[in-house]
Image (cartoon, rainbow, N blue to C red):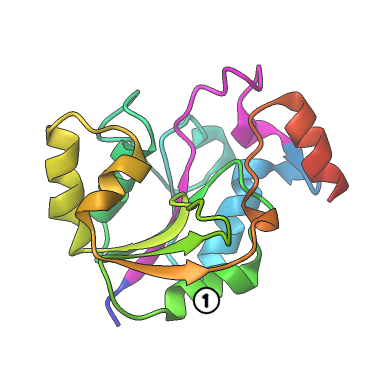
Amino acid sequence: METCRGFVLAGGRSRRMGEDKGRLNWGGQPLVVHQWQRLERMAPPAAIVGGRYEDLGLPSLPDAHPEQGPLGGILTALAHSEAALILAVDMPLVTDGTLAELLRRPGGDAVVPRHPDGRIQPLAALYRASAQPKLAAAFGEGTRRVVDALGHLDIAWWETGPDEFRSMNTPAEYAEALES
């Protein structure tokens, strides 16, 4: 298998949360640290894409496409690795078993979880080098939503349950996740 690194996408503005999601307390540490540590165990060396976390001492990459959404962050990650295990900072309920399964799945430009109801989760997924030119072309054509760009890829879907893929965009969702 190609060399794979883990990347925490942490470049959003957290408008609905009202504060930086990466700095929310999760198990006694900032959420971005928690997510980075998980990826560092799975696909080292892990790094943060976007955000301002220099004070936390985490390896980070400036987003090559700031303010352009997570697709720009995925492209930044793929510029630094043959394969990128992507995990959004605001998805702490994704299990280590799921991350390991994404790394094990063969085939395709990407391995993307798909819920039984058809919803997909492209921000806890594996992207391979073959995805980079296709995603870059979609980005160059003005596509900014990852789900729209996936139409350009050969996807290896992984059927899974929906519970662990909840993101935390509001204080209420954060409180709910803390109770999980």
What's the residue type where badge 1 is placed?
A: Glu
Q: Residue at x 27, y 44 (%)?
A: 149
In the rendered structure, the answer to whether residue 163 lies left or right of residue 105 reads right
Q: Is residue 85 above or below residue 24?
A: below
Q: Is residue 136 above or below residue 42?
A: above
- Number of numbered markers: 1
The boundaries of the magenta stretch are: 4-24
Q: Could you say whether the residue bearing mark 1 is in a helix, strand or loop?
A: helix
Q: Position of residue 115 (x, y in %)?
A: 56, 59
Res. 62 in view: yes
Q: Nearer the viewer, residue 64 or 122?
A: 122
Question: How many residues crowd mark 1 within 10 Å: few (<14), some (14–19), many (20+)?
Answer: some
Q: Nearer the viewer, residue 14 or 149?
A: 149
Q: Residue at x 37, y 31 (%)?
A: 69
Q: Position of residue 158 (x, y in %)?
A: 47, 70
Q: Residue at x 60, y 43 (%)?
A: 32
Q: Is residue 82 above or below residue 71?
A: below
Q: Is residue 139 above or below residue 40?
A: above
Residue 47 is one of the magenta-drawn residues:
no
In the rendered structure, the answer to whether residue 130 lies left or right of residue 97 reads left
Q: Position of residue 159 (x, y in %)?
A: 52, 69
User: Which image quarter: residue 15?
Assistant: top right
Q: Nearer the viewer, residue 18 or 160?
A: 160
- In the displayed orientation, state which residue is furthest to the front: 117
Res. 79 in view: no
In the rendered structure, the answer to whether residue 131 lies left or right of residue 167 reads left
* Residue receiving disc 1: 101
Residue 23 is one of the magenta-drawn residues:
yes
Assign the N terminus to one quadrant of the image.
bottom left
Q: Residue at x 75, y 35 (%)?
A: 174
Q: Position of residue 60 (x, y in %)?
A: 41, 44
